[in-house]
């Protein structure tokens, strides 16, 4: 099994929704762990990359360009009993495990409760935004005020990708083009949220070049 690293940089604030609120304060909240560190679930990132790769495949097909972007081979076929050969981990901040263990220790000790809590940790990575619905007359609708929590821009997440089939160029190409076309994640993307830059790295952390593959398509 071959290992790669997925790097995702937030160019704008992102709402990676959990589908839940946060008490009476936040109407729409993000995904975060038990100590307050945001992360991106593996299933979410896999779905986004799959959709992105499918868009590339459709663009190539409509342009009459023959280049193997094998979405079903990489991400699996719906209803198929055989699982896909590509496995994704959750995307987390750099040095996530060490940071989490350290924060868990101080939270459990109770020694720093006056300055450290899950809410304060969460505030380090996030910010809140408020919005309301405005009518055609320019007046806000009653009870339409909503508060959302978003992850701050410039936050970078990392995750592992494992591929069962060693040195399968079609799968690597599919992942590379999926990353190249992957520009947005989360909700409210038409409001300027969730703009991202996605890069595929090898196990050593070196970016896998895609320039030669693009030149091959164009020549």
Image: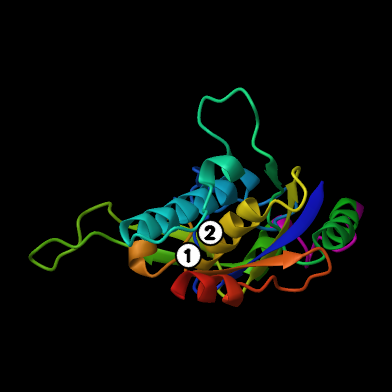
In the picture, residue 100 is in which quadrant?
A: bottom right
Image coordinates for residue 156, horizontal then vertical, percent: 66, 70
In the picture, residue 134 is in which quadrant?
A: bottom left
Q: Which residue is mark 1?
A: 181
Position of 65 with respect to 14 (left or right) is left
| Residue beneath the point at 29% across and 61% down | 132
Residue 17 in view: no
For the residue carrying disc 1, how many other residues have a C-alpha within 10 Å: few (<14), some (14-19), or many (20+)? some
Residue 59 in view: yes
Position of 84 with respect to 189 (left or right) is right
Q: Nearer the viewer, residue 19 or 3?
A: 3
Position of 95 with respect to 215 (left or right) is right
In the picture, residue 206 is in which quadrant?
A: bottom right
Image coordinates for residue 138, horizontal then vertical, percent: 13, 68
For the residue carrying disc 2, how many other residues have a C-alpha within 10 Å: few (<14), some (14-19), or many (20+)? many
> Considering the numbered disc 1 on the image, is that residue within a helix, a strand or a loop?
helix
Image coordinates for residue 182, horizontal then vertical, percent: 50, 63
| Residue beneath the point at 91% across and 55% down | 105
Name the outermost residue toward the left: 137
> Considering the numbered disc 2 on the image, is that residue within a helix, a strand or a loop?
helix
- Tell me the distance, in whole angstroms, between the alpha carbons under discs 1 and 2: 5 Å
Q: Nearer the viewer, residue 116 or 9?
A: 9
Task: Kindly identify which numbered label has been placed on residue 36.
Answer: none
Image coordinates for residue 124, horizontal then vertical, percent: 67, 70
Which range is magenta? 109-118
Q: Nearer the viewer, residue 21 or 18?
A: 18
Q: Which residue is mark 2?
A: 178
Q: Main secondary structure of the magenta part?
A: loop
205 shown above or below 111: below
Judge whether residue 196 is colored magenta. Answer: no
Check contact, mark 1 vs mark 2: CB within 8 A.
yes
| Residue beneath the point at 80% across and 51% down | 2
């Amino acid at each position: 099994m071959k290992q790669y690293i997925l790097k995702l940089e937030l160019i704008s604030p992102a709402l990676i929704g959990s589908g839940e609120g946060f008490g009476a304060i936040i109407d729409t909240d993000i995904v975060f762990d038990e100590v307050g560190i945001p992360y991106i679930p593996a299933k979410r990132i896999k779905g986004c990359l799959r959709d992105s790769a499918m868009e590339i495949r459709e663009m190539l097909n409509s342009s009459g360009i023959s280049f193997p972007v094998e979405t079903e081979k990489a991400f699996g076929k719906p209803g198929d009993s055989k699982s896909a050969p590509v496995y994704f981990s959750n995307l987390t901040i750099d040095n996530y495990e060490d940071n989490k263990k350290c924060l868990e220790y101080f939270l459990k000790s109770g020694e720093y409760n006056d300055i450290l809590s899950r809410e304060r940790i969460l505030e380090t990575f996030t910010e809140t935004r408020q919005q309301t619905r405005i009518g055609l007359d320019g007046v806000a609708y009653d009870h339409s005020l909503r508060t959302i929590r978003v992850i701050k821009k410039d936050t970078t997440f990392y995750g592992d990708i494992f591929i069962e089939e060693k040195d399968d160029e079609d799968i690597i190409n599919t992942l590379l083009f999926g990353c190249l076309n992957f520009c947005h994640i989360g909700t409210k993307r038409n409001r300027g949220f969730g703009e991202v830059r996605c890069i595929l790295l090898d196990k050593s952390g070196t970016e896998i070049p895609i320039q030669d593959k693009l030149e091959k398509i164009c020549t």
